Amino acid sequence: MSSEISSNGIANNGVIITETSKPLPAGVTLPLYMDNHATTPMDPRVLEAMLPYFSGKFGNAASRNHAFGWEAEKAVETAREQIAKLIGCTPKEIIFTSGATESNNLALKGIAEMYRERGNHIITQATEHKAILDTCKKLEKQGYRVTYLPVQADGLIDIEDLKRAIDDKTILVSIMYANNEIGVIQPIAEIGKLCHEKGILFHTDAVQAVGKIPVDVQKDNIDVLSLSAHKIYGPKGVGALYVRRRNPRVQISEQINGGGHERGMRSGTLNVPGIVGLGKACELSGEEMASESARLIELRDYMKAKFEKALDYVHVNGNMEHHLPGNLNMSFVYVEGESLLMGINDIAVSSGSACTSATLEPSYVLKALGLGDDVAHSSIRFGLGRFNTKAEVDYVSDKVIDVVLKLRELSPLYEMVKEGIDLTKIEWAAH
């Protein structure tokens, strides 16, 4: 990281980056959360639904010979119904897991193992979540072939690329519904239709989409779908996997053995309070999705317009037509994202860089769009959510604009560009 911010907001080179003396606008408290793609705060209504199952209603849902177990089982089945209603399936097609990472692992490994005699080829895309990419790498070590489709500059895959990648050994296509970094929504129904025509199973990691935009597994031609509670104002550590029961009936080889819970696909005592929370979160999302989406789109577009009016050399990453309501991923060129984050250290957002053990690498998702390292490093992801307000959007955008302007005053590259110098034609001296 290029500079460090002290507690009074002064960078180590003595330049003031932040101003903490200004009074906060009404309705804004710090620290301020705007990273709702990473996780969401729990909705108080979800917590209220969960609380009884931590104490009085503590039974094991698999205990079928007394009232405590029956009560827990009833709560679990209610949650199945709430989830099924949100995504357009039957309750029996919902399998509970510890979260989307487990759901993705169960889907990919379970299908690969079960359908090994049919083929060994899996297709995914380069911008998937690591829970898919790392699982695919593991399967490659076990002898499976994996095709990683590129994405276009706007983040969407090319359907023709998918058609060309399919061969007679392809058993599974896994394409995420909406990207967690750039918010781009893939043409899921079209992908699913193609898979069904070819007799190939279609899985989607729908973690960022479920509860935010309409998802219907029938209309979208989805066979297997992963979702998680903590992205939709529910608890952490609980998720679900939708597994189609007919046309086609999908079979999945279990990855955790012992007890045969969840139709034999996922053994283990169910997290009843978490499952109740997931169900309630899905119910609330379904009821409030239309109004919430409209409000978040309005806030997102308002924030984008403020940035574009006040700053030059900014641009949105990802297709804005097919886009999650609360996502805004913007590059503030000639500013290092990590320095910008330190300048707004009372605001929770994400940068376009991923800190690894010894290096600061640009996001692989942004690199897949064809962005240069400098532009990828200058990117910030704003994740607007249910509890963000217009006053907060004003505060964040004004603060970001202020810090970007100050950092650019320190940037010789920005100064050269403003003077009309073409940076691509400069021969930089080697150190």
Image (cartoon, helix red, strand yellow):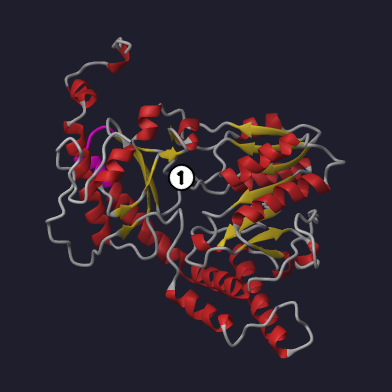
85 or 422, nearer to the observer:
422
Q: Is residue 409 above or below residue 106?
A: above
Q: Residue 392 versus residue 138: which sits nearer the camera? A: 138
Residue 378 seen in render: yes
Q: Quadrant location of the N terminus?
A: top left
In the rendered image, the vertical position of residue 248 relative to residue 16, given as above or below? below
The crowding category of the residue bearing disc 1, from other C-alpha atoms within 10 Å (few below 14, some 14 to 19, many at least 20), is many
Left or right position of 216 against 34? right
Please state the extent of the stretch shown in magenta in the rendering. Answer: 305-313
Quadrant in the picture for residue 190 = top right
**Badge 1 element:** loop
* Percent position of residue 173, x then y: 69, 42
Determine whether, in the image, residue 5 is placed left or right of residue 321: left
Can you name the residue that lies furthest to the bottom here? 67
Q: Quadrant of the C terminus?
A: top left
Q: Main secondary structure of the magenta part?
A: helix
Residue 306 sits inside the magenta stretch: yes
Please tell me which residue is depicted at 17% across the width and 61% down the height of the picture. Answer: 24
Residue 128 at x, y percent in the picture? 57, 42
Measuring from the top left, give residue 133's x and y in whole percent: 61, 40
* Position of residue 3 in the picture relative to residue 192 (left or right): left
On screen, residue 180 versus residue 245, left or right, reads left
Task: Tell me where residue 69 sits by quadrant.
Answer: bottom right
Report if residue 187 is visible in the image. no
Which amino acid is tagged 1?
Answer: Glu
User: In this figure, which residue is indicated by the disc labeled 1?
Assistant: 181
Tell me what residue is drawn at x 50 percent, y 60 percent: 231
Image coordinates for residue 234, horizontal then vertical, percent: 51, 67
